[in-house]
């Protein structure tokens, strides 16, 4: 039987090395970018689950396909009213609730 190599990986130290200490401007910028990319992926997944193309979604919200593409790549952030239109266009609602 082979031996198992267990290495403890300190994620916090790696994040600090890569993006700076918690509370620094560079770390906050990295966290914001991560949230933008996460939200963009949610929109992309929801659109695909709704069976819509980028063009179809764009038409439903009164935008062009390029706008939807930029949203899904995390290059732009929709306004709150636009987010509600996007959700409604995909047959979804937006719920704000305590976590």
Image: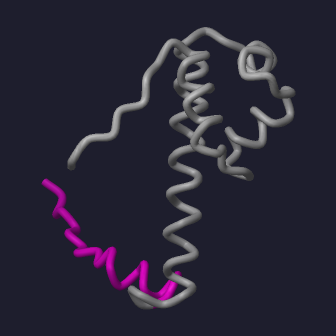
* Colour pattern of the rendering: one colour
Extreme-left residue of the structure: 1
Q: Is residue 80 above or below residue 47?
A: below
Q: How far across and down, in percent of the image, does residue 55 sit?
A: 81, 18
Residue visible at 55% across and 30% down in the picture:
84
- Which quarter of the picture shows residue 54? top right
Tell me the magenta residue range.
1-20
Tally of numbered discs: 0
Q: Residue at x 70, y 41 (%)?
A: 71
Tell me: residue 50, above or below residue 65. above
Q: Quadrant of residue 60?
A: top right
The furthest residue to the top? 51
- Residue 73 higher or lower than 4, as above or below: above
Q: Is residue 15 magenta?
A: yes
Please tell me which residue is depicted at 41% across the width and 87% down the height of the picture.
23
Q: Position of residue 48 (x, y in %)?
A: 59, 18
Question: Quick check: is 7 in the magenta stretch?
Answer: yes
Q: Residue placed at 56% from the left, 39% from the top?
A: 41
78 relative position to 24: left or right: right
Across and down, in percent, residue 6 comes to: 20, 69
* Image quarter hosting the N terminus: bottom left
Residue 89 in percent (x, y) is at: 61, 16
Q: Nearer the viewer, residue 89 or 81?
A: 81
Q: In the rendered image, which quarter is residue 40 located in?
A: top right
């Amino acid at each position: 039987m082979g031996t198992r190599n267990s290495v403890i990986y300190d994620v916090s130290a790696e994040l600090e090395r890569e993006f700076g200490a918690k509370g620094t401007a560079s770390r906050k910028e990295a966290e914001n970018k991560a949230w933008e990319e996460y939200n963009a992926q949610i929109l992309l997944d929801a659109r695909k689950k709704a069976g819509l193309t980028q063009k179809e979604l764009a038409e439903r919200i009164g935008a062009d396909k390029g706008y939807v593409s930029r949203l899904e790549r995390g290059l732009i952030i929709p306004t709150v009213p636009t987010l509600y239109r996007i959700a409604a266009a995909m047959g979804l609602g937006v719920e704000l609730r305590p976590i």
